[in-house]
């Protein structure tokens, strides 16, 4: 029978390629059989701790063999995985726990050091790095390594992925097993992935693009190479060379760093067959430079949304030179239309809302029927992006309706930053916009009006913000103003700030 | 001010100011501790280049030179700082 649940991918690969290395991480490796057995043990442990089908479980771990085990274990136990950034502050994690009504958190040793004792989870499971042939924790040793066989179906939720919303608070995108599997098949098909492929993963698994790297490769019995050290891009390039990877995936900032501040342009990685780019539009000038530096490697420019599990379009590499700036054509089994606000389909070259239909489209936002109704219309998902189709059906994105800031691969809500600025009690009013950045596509810029100009200290405010928000949400540029421009309605005029 | 103190001051002011959940040990990985990310490393490199009037090549952006405060100090010594 064909896999119809996400963890069936792992179980099938463990049957077909039991001794094959599925995950490389530094000098650690794990075979499909090892990952499957460890996931089974952890799933049994979760169930013994009282988790039930449909319970939400938070995973806050950096990429590792253990984090792969945690993800599949949660699914095998019939629960819903909520993977969040491992560098989240305790107040951010507390929000996820409360909003998702999650009792159980799975943490790594690093995240546990910061979070344990500071978050309201009733059960915390700490997973260490897994060494070959050893078990992660003594508790797991007593658990069976057989499939738990929880009676769940593909319409059950597999993941809730928090993404920053226009209201400021992160929204939970609900994805079923079917949503994810459908999109995984589409990606495998257009990338032409096979068991001999080996992908370098520098993107975090909590990010839907990162997670798709794992599932697509497990679907075909291929391998993933984890490297969390992109802060030192040269060590990643060497790892790509030494592990003979066939694929690489990044967001625009990844490629900007690789091309501008690493040995990548000069290093000939003969095994490398293709590269994928998503997570925001990459400047065509950078795309061109990559094509020129690496002419033999297929570059797939892609577009997607967390709400689409995530992939919506891809640009076939052979069309890239003629369609530079395009997001490409719909992925298999997905329909993209351009529509006005009433849902009327627009003509070629007419600019409107980019909408999508397909079995990869989310079920809605967790406990948020208002936002769900805004995004899911009878004609499909309204992505919030605007653009047009050319006469060959290639899609071009011209802007974002929502004003989210895309910092690297992360979506950041200006409202969340503004709320935190106001929360400092040092600021009378604040406005945050995204400004272009060479490495991260966009970064937040904060305009603040001090509450008390005589005693105001910008460094003090920056210190407060660093305590309050994760690093990628922190404004990189600041401007202190005496007042903010306003519209007639009294609302802050952000367009005037952009001029 | 000593080289090490200047680096610590820069890291404290730019990456961890205000955060009480992060400790700063000179032999601990600034990446694994969540203090610096990939753009943080580039900010650090800019700071080192302008403060100590040196040029850091792309080939030198490796953990052995920049991962911990001790490594950074050792690296600067090789640059005759």
Image: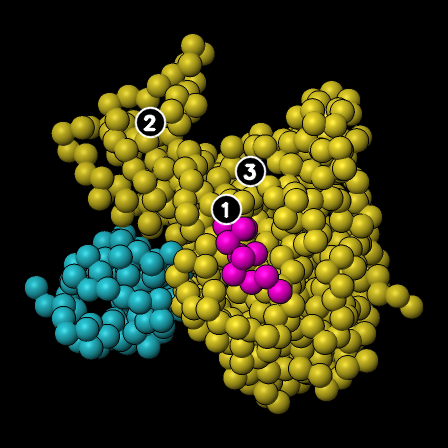
Chain colours: A yellow, B cyan
Q: Note whether B33 is above or below A398 in the view shown.
A: below
Which comes sooner in the sequence, label 1 or label 2? 1
Residue of label 3: A165
Image quarter of the C terminus of chain A = top left
How far from the left and from the top, in percent, is residue A300?
A: 65, 55
Residue of label 2: A429
How far from the left and from the top, in percent, is residue A394?
A: 72, 39
Boundaries of the magenta span: A286-296
Disc 1 residue crowd, few under 14, some 14–19, many 20+, Cα 10 Å = few
Rounded to the nearest angstrom, the CA distance separating label 2 from label 3 is 21 Å
Q: Quadrant of residue A193?
A: bottom right
Relative horizontal placement of residue A399, taking residue A470 as reference (left or right): right
Which comes sooner in the sequence, label 3 or label 1? 3
Relative horizontal placement of residue A157, taking residue A453 as reference (left or right): right
How far from the left and from the top, in percent, is residue A102?
A: 60, 55
Q: Residue furthest top?
A: A488
State which mark lies toward you, 3 or 1: 1
């Amino acid at each position: 029978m064909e896999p119809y649940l996400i963890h069936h991918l792992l179980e099938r690969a463990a049957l077909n390629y039991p001794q094959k290395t599925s995950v490389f991480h530094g000098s650690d490796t794990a075979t499909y059989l090892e990952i499957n057995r460890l996931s089974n043990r952890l799933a049994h442990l979760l169930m013994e701790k009282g988790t039930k089908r449909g319970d939400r479980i938070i995973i806050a771990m950096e990429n590792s063999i253990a984090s792969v085990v945690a993800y599949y274990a949660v699914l095998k136990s019939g629960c819903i995985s909520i993977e969040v950034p491992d560098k989240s502050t305790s107040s951010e994690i507390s929000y996820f726990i409360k909003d998702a009504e999650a009792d159980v958190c799975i943490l790594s040793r690093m995240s546990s050091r910061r979070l344990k004792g500071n978050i309201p989870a009733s059960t915390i499971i700490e997973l260490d790095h897994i060494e070959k042939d050893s078990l992660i924790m003594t508790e797991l040793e007593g658990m069976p390594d057989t499939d738990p066989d929880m009676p769940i179906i593909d319409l059950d939720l597999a993941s809730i992925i928090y993404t920053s919303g226009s209201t400021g608070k992160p929204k939970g995108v609900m994805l079923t097993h079917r949503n994810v599997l459908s999109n995984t098949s589409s990606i495998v098909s257009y990338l032409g992935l096979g068991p001999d492929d080996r992908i370098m993963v520098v993107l975090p698994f909590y990010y839907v693009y990162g997670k798709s790297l794992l599932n697509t490769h497990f679907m075909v019995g291929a391998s993933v190479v984890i490297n969390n050290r992109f802060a030192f891009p040269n060590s990643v390039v060497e790892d790509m060379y030494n592990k003979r990877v066939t694929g690489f995936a990044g967001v625009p900032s990844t490629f900007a760093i690789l091309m501008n501040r690493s040995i990548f342009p000069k290093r000939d990685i003969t095994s490398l067959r293709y590269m994928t780019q998503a997570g925001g539009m990459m400047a065509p000038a950078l795309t061109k430079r990559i094509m020129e530096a690496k002419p033999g490697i297929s570059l797939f420019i892609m577009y997607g949304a967390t709400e689409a599990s995530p992939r919506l379009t891809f640009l076939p590499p052979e069309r890239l030179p003629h369609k530079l700036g395009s997001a490409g054509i719909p992925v298999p089994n997905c329909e993209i239309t351009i529509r006005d606000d009433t849902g009327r389909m627009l003509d070629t070259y007419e600019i409107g809302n980019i909408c999508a239909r397909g079995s990869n489209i989310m079920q809605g936002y967790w406990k948020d029927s208002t936002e769900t109704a805004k995004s899911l219309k009878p004609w499909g998902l309204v992505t919030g992006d605007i653009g047009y189709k050319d006469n060959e059906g290639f899609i071009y994105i011209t802007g974002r309706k929502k004003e989210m800031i895309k910092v690297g691969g992360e979506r950041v809500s200006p409202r969340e930053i503004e709320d935190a600025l106001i929360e400092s009690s040092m600021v009378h009013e604040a406005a945050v916009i995204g400004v272009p950045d060479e490495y991260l596509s966009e970064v937040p810029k904060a305009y603040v009006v001090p509450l008390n100009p005589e005693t105001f200290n910008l460094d003090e405010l920056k210190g407060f913000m660093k305590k309050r928000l994760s690093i990628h949400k922190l404004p990189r540029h600041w401007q202190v103003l005496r007042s903010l421009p306003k519209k007639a309605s009294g609302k802050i005029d952000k367009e005037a700030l952009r001029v | 001010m000593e080289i090490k103190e200047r680096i610590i001051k820069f890291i404290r002011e730019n990456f961890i100011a205000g955060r009480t959940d992060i400790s700063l040990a000179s032999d601990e990985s600034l990446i694994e501790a969540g203090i610096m990310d990939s753009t943080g490393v580039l900010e650090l490199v800019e700071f080192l280049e302008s403060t100590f009037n040196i040029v850091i090549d792309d080939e030198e952006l490796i953990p052995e030179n920049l991962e911990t405060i001790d490594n950074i100090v050792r690296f600067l010594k090789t640059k005759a700082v």
